[in-house]
Image (spheres, grey):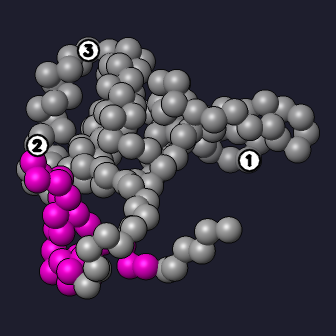
Amino acid sequence: MVTINHMPTLEFTKTHMGLIPADQKAADWFHKQKSGTPISILVSAPRNGGFHRKFFAMLNVAYENHDWPEISTKYGMARCSQDMFRSYVIVKAGHYNVELTPTGEVRATPKSIAFGNMEQDEFERLYSDVLDIILQEFLTGWSDDDMRKAVEQIITFA
């Protein structure tokens, strides 16, 4: 049985000489370790936060520039929310999990885009796939370049 001590999360940077501590906290911990001491590492590479903001800017541009109908239902007036739009385009782009409801109905739910749940390369594929869906179904008169310019404008002024 392996016992894992609850250790702080430390960051290291890959260099041509190997891993080096990325900050003072990591350096202090690393230098306390004796040479030859085995160290177990749970590896993760933080996702690009700027790209994450770019994804949400793209969703906002698409949502704000589409004419959303409002319909009357037995529950009252209804309109697509930004959360529903995000879920829809993620599923439509093929990034989903299949779940079974309590009544036996199969339902596709969007994959979590939380930093700990999706690696950078998969997130970049998601961005590209969602962009394709947006341009095909919601902003049909827009090009990739139109979207890039609109997203840059939002990110610049955020």
Q: Quadrant of residue 84?
A: top right
- State whether residue 57 appears in this view: no
Q: Type of residue at label 1?
A: Tyr
- Look at the numbered discs 1 and 2 and tell me whether their residues touch, using CB distance below 8 Å: no
Quarter containing the N terminus: bottom right
Locate residue 40: give its quadrant. Answer: bottom left
Q: Position of residue 39 (x, y in %)?
A: 39, 68
Q: Residues within 10 Å of mark 3 (few under 14, many from 20)?
A: few
Q: Earlier in the sequence, mark 3 or mark 1?
A: 1
Q: Which mark is residue 153?
A: 2
Q: Residue 41 location, x and y as percent?
A: 40, 62
Q: Residue 75's mark?
A: 1
Please name the residue shown 32% across and 15% down the image: 140
Q: Does 148 sit left or right of 67 as displayed?
A: left
Start and end of the magenta stretch?
7-31
Query: Which amino acid type corresponds to the residue marked 3 in the rendered image?
Result: Gly
| Label 1, label 2: how far apart the Cα atoms are | 38 Å
* Left or right, residue 32 beside residue 22: right
Whole-percent x, y for residue 13 in the image: 18, 58
Disc 3 target residue: 141
**Foreground label between 3 and 2:** 2
**Is 15 colored magenta in this rendering?**
yes
Please, is residue 40 above or below residue 58 in the view?
A: below
Quick check: marks 3 and 2 in contact, CB under 8 Å?
no
Residue 14 sits above or below residue 67 on the image: below
User: Within the image, what quadrant is residue 91 found in?
Assistant: top right
